[in-house]
Image (tube, rainbow, N blue to C red):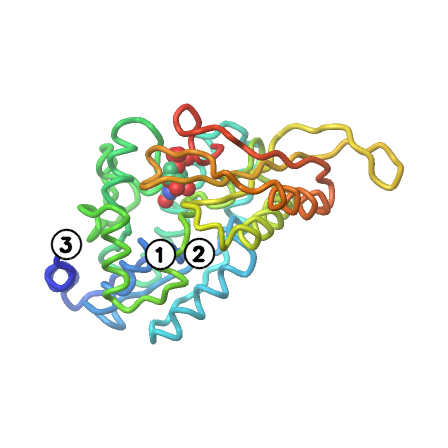
Amino acid sequence: MDCRKFIEEQVAAIKKAVGDGTAINALSGGVDSSTVTVLGHKAIGKNLKTIFVDNALMRKGEPKQVVRIFADMGIPVEMVDAKDEFLSALKGLTDPEEKRQAITDTFYSKVFSRLVKKHKAKFLLHGTILTDIEETVAGIKRQHNILEQIGIDPKEAFGYPVLEPLKTLRKDNVRELARQLGIPAEITERIPFPGPALAARIVGEVTEERLETVREATDIVEEELAESGAFQYLAVLLNDYATGIRNNKREFGQIIVVRCIESVDAREATATELSWGKLNQLCERITQIKGVNRCLYDLTPKPPATVEYI
Ligand code: XMP
């Protein structure tokens, strides 16, 4: 791919669409939204308002880390606290698609339409990539950021139009583009993390307490497997309980699944052959989390499993 040409074309297209108005974009810290942020900033500078929405579903320390990385690149990011809004939208929901839908609705219809009005933005800049569109259109999974391609007119549904500069690219091209744009390796080489964030790793209801458990487990898995070279690794909280013993007392505890996969583009995947020593180390640390007394390693390939659990 000719990155320079792509950057030139997209910068020109954003400039032309937005003119001297303002645009807004949501930054999650993933490679797609980070790339869009830098492209948008190149095109319209301070007329791009970049927002990091704290939706309560992010990993440990993630909101502050993302804001810091962009501040270092000279791009200001406004942090918006929407934790309570997301948690109340997810309250009581257990069906995977309903949970995804609740996150989409809260994000676009509530938080973002409010921010678009506040900033008088003409457009929302969006990091949708080709794979998101293909999987959603094929009915495999409703990626939370797909709108127009499944017949939702964002202008009509949410009150603002969307620009999607990356919609013809796959992940490897986006990473290449991100490197070319000078985005640091802690973002460009980051393992994939889903839009619905830790909510994709909780089977059953998403509550503050359950988020805390999966967040702690995620932190351990990411630290232990950072050097594994695997495509992606994650922790999942199941909706089941099992009997265990702690401090010589019976405990009905929670179960964490560790998943670590080899893949090229996440369309197919196989479990990584981790060493017995590493698996034991993971198990030992994860069962120290409050209320967790079992840790399982998932061997299932994709298909028939998916990578995430919702
Ligand atoms: P699945 O679970 O469908 O995941 O096998 C394939 C890859 O996509 C990521 N994933 C998502 N990414 N929004 C995203 O941006 C989503 O809604 C979403 N769901 C899954 C997942 O982490 C894996 O890398």
The answer to whether residue 285 of the structure is visible from this angle is yes
Q: Quadrant of ligand 1?
A: top left
Q: Position of residue 188 (x, y in %)?
A: 34, 59
* Quadrant containing the N terminus in the rendered view: bottom left
- Mark 3 surroundings within 10 Å by alpha-carbon count, few (fewer than 14), some (14 through 19), many (20 or more): few
Give the foreground label among 2 and 3: 3
What distance separates the C-alpha of mark 3 from that of mark 1?
A: 26 Å
The answer to whether residue 101 of the structure is visible from this angle is no
Q: Which residue is mark 1?
A: 26
Q: Of the residues under marks 3 and 1, which one precedes in the sequence?
A: 3
Q: Which residue is mark 3?
A: 1
Q: Nearer the viewer, residue 66 or 297?
A: 297
Q: Is residue 165 left or right of 66 when viewed as pictured?
A: left
Mark 3, secondary structure of its residue: loop
Mark 2, secondary structure of its residue: strand
Residue 95 is tagged as none
Query: In percent of the image, x 30 and y 26: which residue is there?
Result: 139
Q: Position of residue 221 (x, y in %)?
A: 56, 48
| Residue type marked 1 | Ala
| Residue type marked 2 | Val
Among the 4 quarters of the image, the one containing residue 41: bottom left
Q: Which residue is mark 2?
A: 53
Query: In percent of the image, x 31 and y 41: which residue is there?
Result: 265
Mark 1, secondary structure of its residue: strand
What distance separates the C-alpha of mark 2 from that of mark 1?
A: 7 Å
Q: Position of residue 303 (x, y in %)?
A: 39, 26
Q: Nearer the viewer, residue 223 or 161?
A: 223
Q: Residue furthest top?
A: 304
Residue 206 vertical position relative to residue 5 in the rendered view, above or below: above
Q: Position of residue 45 (x, y in %)?
A: 24, 72
Query: In percent of the image, x 20 and y 46: which residue is there?
Result: 167
Q: Of the residues under marks 2 and 3, which one precedes in the sequence?
A: 3
